[in-house]
Amino acid sequence: MRARRLDIAPPCAEFSAMSAAMPAPLTDRAALARFRARAARAPALFLLEATAAEIKERLSEVNRSFTAPAVVTAQPTPAPWADLLPGARIVPDEAVLALEPGAHDLVVHALCLHWSDDPLGQIIQCRRALRPDGLFIAAFFGGRSLHELRAVLAQAESDLYGTLSPRVLPMADIRDAGGLLQRAGLALPVADRQLTQVLYRDLGALVADLRAMGESNTLAARRRAPMPRALWARAQALYREHFADAEGRLPATVETLFLTGWAPAESQPQPLRPGSATARLAEALGTTETPLEPVPGKPRGTGSD
């Protein structure tokens, strides 16, 4: 990938320290760039478009007009973000994002965070690019994605060769992904997910869609030789045996994780100190409060654990 001169401030100390301590790259970024360029010639955008529609709906529920949005994306063209966020700055998902500190009131990280070797660093950079009380939204594929394909490839390779090769990208669990928001310093963090099932006539159709989405295997530790025909045939047979529906179609699960957080601001709601409530819950619910029974052997009024 050709290096670009980026007119941005140096990364924060936290991000620099993390980058210096990063292990060997998980992703072959040169191969990823080649596969994305190949996919751009005849792209399959149905998952991207569905995700953009979901983000649009979520933004409609926020009582806010965003005037300086930015979108971090793997797509070389602005579609479908040009319709969703007119005038948004389109930023490629490089290790150092071309985002200026405090320049945006909305940053969307769109279906590419799963390919990052340092997802926390990506979120920190997005947080730094936000104005106070600016909104961050990330959508990316989660750990349940392609679990059927992962299982049959592992079983087929074990059956035939007694070994396992990295063929499907490892992806984050929602609990781990949600924790990244707080570690990145975002307020009011929320993590949720959507499960989608796509049906295919055979394994070849599934792989063709992955290629057209630029989601082919680009793990740095992958085997570079083409998949042997025997392995392909065994994987497809296992897929049909264990997962095919009544009509013989092969389901592929897609888990999309959504992370939402806000750049800290004094105007945001703050949690009250414990014990500072001025009304009782029973009064708000219009019900009768029933005191707890005292702990046996402990006088009333001394409290309990």
Image (cartoon, helix red, strand yellow):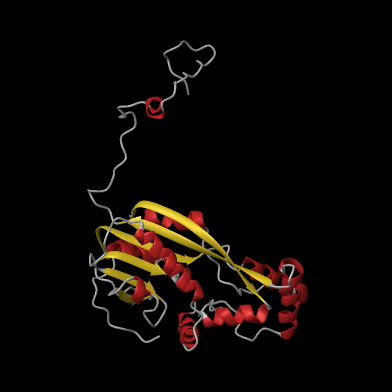
Looking at the rendered structure, the number of numbered marks drawn on it comes to 0
Q: Position of residue 247 (x, y in %)?
A: 73, 71
| Residue at 50% in and 84% down | 35
- Which of the two residues, 104 or 217, is positioned nearer the viewer here? 104
Q: Position of residue 79 (x, y in %)?
A: 39, 79
Where is the N terminus found, in terms of image quarters? bottom left
Q: Position of residue 226 (x, y in %)?
A: 64, 86
Corner quadrant of residue 254: bottom right
Left or right: residue 45 compared with residue 165: left
Q: Position of residue 160 (x, y in %)?
A: 77, 76
| Residue at 44% in and 64% down | 54
From the viewer's perspective, is residue 98 above or below residue 31? above
Answer yes or no: is residue 25 visible.
no
- Which of the two residues, 167 or 35, is positioned nearer the viewer here? 35
Corner quadrant of residue 227: bottom right
Answer yes or no: is residue 206 visible.
yes
| Residue at 47% in and 10% down | 299
| Residue at 37% in and 74% down | 81
From the viewer's perspective, is residue 214 above or below residue 66? below
Corner quadrant of residue 125: bottom left
